[in-house]
Image (cartoon, grey):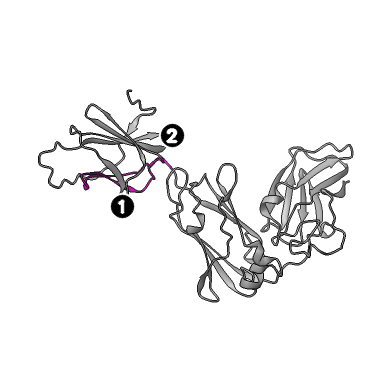
Amino acid sequence: MKYTFKTRAILVFFCFMIFINCKDEPAIRNITVNYENAKAVSVSFDFASTKAFSVHLKDRATPILGEYQTEGVTRIFTPVVPFSDGLTYAVVMDEKVVSIFSIKNDTVESPELVGIYPSTNELPENLLKMYFQFSQPMEELGESLEHITVFNRTLNKEEAVFLELESELWNKDHSLLTLWLDPGRIKTDLIPNRKYGLPLLEEHEYEIRIDANFRGANGRPLKNEYTKSFKVGKSDKMKPSPEDWEISVSGDKVSIEFNEPLDAILLKECFRIVNTENKEIPCFSKIEAKEQVLHLVCPQQLNKGEYKLLVDTRLEDLAGNNLNRLFDVDLSSKNNMDTSLQKEIRFKIN
């Protein structure tokens, strides 16, 4: 079966070939890295010999898994996972490196870390989770915690604060990563809590480091290394209180000021505006002041009259307390728990 390239082959970079005891063999010629949808999907070269070859990461003994094909003097290797941009590979025959090539596609942009949430620099001791927003989809190897570390400046040591999950928590396009701090260490009197204590400690200072080797789905490493410094305050033992929120209207914008930072992702999902006929007013969300202010911007200026702000009760603060219950609550308590799905806040435009 004839091998067909779906996109034009691009010769991106290759080093001078190294031969050891190969005087009787013809040279490898025309080594080419082939791209498809900006990914390096195969490598091909001309080599008249019928000797078997393998492709390795440079200085690695284990060959890369993939499919080998021969078409006349052309040899083709298609890896199971596309080659990674910025890495160097070796063609090996008889346990000898006969050629090396590097992947470098200047048309592909490196991913960037565009946000870490919560964005505030003082976090509660019982912080439940953090979000990492990237500019493009990231690799799907399930090894994020190898690239994201937390250093306790107060104790001068690295801390394992994030919960390791078998399946990482990414959004659909793999650009938003959610990392949980161990709930078992946060909930009072659970075995992990008694044995290890809280993941974060009040009055301690920390630094999160995201190294540049964290790669995007296109194989490119992060554009830079990133850090976020924060200090830890007291545990948050209170539910968010809609009664304390301040609502104001200006033109096409309804603004809600909270008395604390709230969950950045849920803020975008948990608010709707309806009129007296319960017809929803189309709006989009804009978050400011380190997740302490939400603007609902409507395409058209709101008319005078009465409106209702509907708030999904799953909205949480940074400690996982939602509008109905505390995260760290005694489940054996006989206190009646609110089970409503939404809260209503009425406001009027004069």
Above or below for 271 versus 49: below
Residue 54 appears left or right of 145:
left
Q: Alpha-carbon distance for marks 2 and 1? A: 27 Å
Q: Is residue 93 magenta?
A: yes
Residue farthest along the top direction in this orientation:
1
Which is more toward the observer, 347 or 267? 267
Q: Residue at x 76, y 47 (%)?
A: 271
Q: Residue at x 52, y 44 (%)?
A: 137
Q: Residue at x 58, y 72 (%)?
A: 205
Q: Residue at x 81, y 57 (%)?
A: 245
Residue 32 appears left or right of 157:
left
Q: Is residue 101 magenta?
A: yes
The x and y percentages for residue 177 are 57, 51
Residue 140 appears left or right of 169:
left
Which is more toward the observer, 293 or 99? 99
Residue type of the residue flagged with mark 2: Asn
Q: Which residue is mark 2?
A: 37
Residue 60 marker: 1
Query: Over which residues does the magenta segment extend?
Result: 81-108
Residue 339 appears left or right of 291:
right
Quarter occupied by residue 181: bottom right
Q: Secondary structure at mark 1?
A: loop
